[in-house]
Image (cartoon, helix red, strand yellow):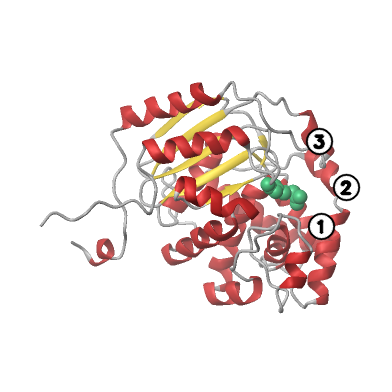
Amino acid sequence: MSLAAACISTGHLPPAQRVQALVADAHARFKAIDDGKVADYIPALAAVPRDLFGVCVVETSGTTHEAGDTGHAFSIQSVSKPFVFALVCEALGEEVARARLGVNSTGLPFDSLLAIDRAEDGSTNPMVNAGAIAAASLAPGASADAKWRFIQDGLSRFAGRELELDRAVYASEAASNQHNQRIARLLQEHGRIYFDPLEATDVYTRQCALKVSTRDLALMSATLANGGVNPLTRERIIDGVCCQHVLAVMVTAGLYENSGEWLYDTGLPGKSGVSGGIVAVAPGKAGLATFAPPLDAAGNSVRGQLAARFLAERLGLNLFASEPSTP
Ligand code: DON
């Protein structure tokens, strides 16, 4: 066994044909579920058809399995957070990123102000809005435009193609994001934002309005499952250690106050967004992504969670699963 192999803890996916059949099965099983509410606090999101449903798995070999509306473009929203944290972690180093942003769970909703006040030092977690706005403020670059270019370029490299801004979604959220501006100002009171608070909020708002498909998200997630190397372009986006830290913050707060329930069900690092996307990362095996707009009360896609749980079980992805050794 090589030294590198001795430092990882992963198994194997079932054969490709079986993975494809299970992805199709997950789509067929849950497509008729109509529970949940499409987000409308960002007005442009309310117009998205509620029956859209895509499921995609990209193996670390690059082999892709998909079912449903996997090519449909939607705004990435909070699913951008782990990837921006990854880029910031890579640029600043993991200890600086931890010290500036915090890595503990908040146990609170994604847009909580209380989470900032409750931590003595005002730190939160880069998976919730406060920590994500602070992460955007740390993007390299002296101007908001430079920070935005760094983020757009980095997320595009994760996706293996140029990601574009959804201008309608950006304009809609920029006109209604007073709450995020309040979060940024509160971070400033605690010395926890590292650029002009309103400009940092604007960069974060643009990041959330990048257009992706379920297929893009699965490849981005597969890059995190593949030690930071994009399985299709073969480009190294972040180093392997940084990648581990990204997965750790996803586990602690990726599904906000429901992160424990999610982990109990899937045993995987995950991240959700209010437009209906979810990614889950099976280290060494695959990236999984789902898209279905109706959300539960915490802002997590209902059908997406069901499909992810089903696939985590059937594909054997749960990180906590083990078998007794043979004597
Ligand atoms: O900042 C916001 O409120 C949105 N741009 C993103 C929030 C989000 O996706 C939370 N996810 N479930």
Q: Residues within 10 Å of mark 1 (few under 14, many from 20)?
A: many
Instruction: Please report whichever mark, 3 or 1, sits nearer to the chain's N-terminal start.
Output: 3
Label 3 element class:
helix
Q: Which residue is mark 2?
A: 176
Residue in view at x 84 percent, y 37 percent: 43
The circle drawn on residue 275 is none
- Whether residue 255 is visible here, answered yes or no, is no
The circle drawn on residue 44 is 3
Mark 1 belongs to which amino acid?
Asn
**Is 283 positioned to the left or the right of 259 in the image?**
left
Residue 23, position as x, y percentages in the image: 44, 29
Residue 231, position as x, y percentages in the image: 41, 46
| Quarter of the image with the N terminus in it | bottom left
| Quarter of the image with the C terminus in it | bottom left
Q: Rounded to the nearest whole Å, what is the CA distance between mark 2 and mark 1? A: 9 Å
Look at the picture and state if 145 lies above or below 273. Answer: below
Instruction: Please report whichever mark, 3 or 2, sits nearer to the chain's N-terminal start.
Output: 3
Mark 1 near ligand 1 (CB under 8 Å)? yes
Label 1 element class:
helix
Residue in view at x 50 percent, y 46 percent: 280
Q: Which residue is mark 1?
A: 180
Mark 3 belongs to which amino acid?
Ala
Look at the picture and state if 214 lies above or below 173. Answer: above
- Whether residue 180 is visible here, answered yes or no, is yes
Q: Rounded to the nearest whole Å, what is the CA distance between mark 3 and mark 2? A: 11 Å
Mark 2 belongs to which amino acid?
Ser
In which quarter of the view is residue 51 placed?
top right
Residue in view at x 85 percent, y 41 percent: 172
Look at the picture and state if 111 lies above or below 14. Answer: below
Label 2 element class:
loop
Residue 229, position as x, y percentages in the image: 43, 53
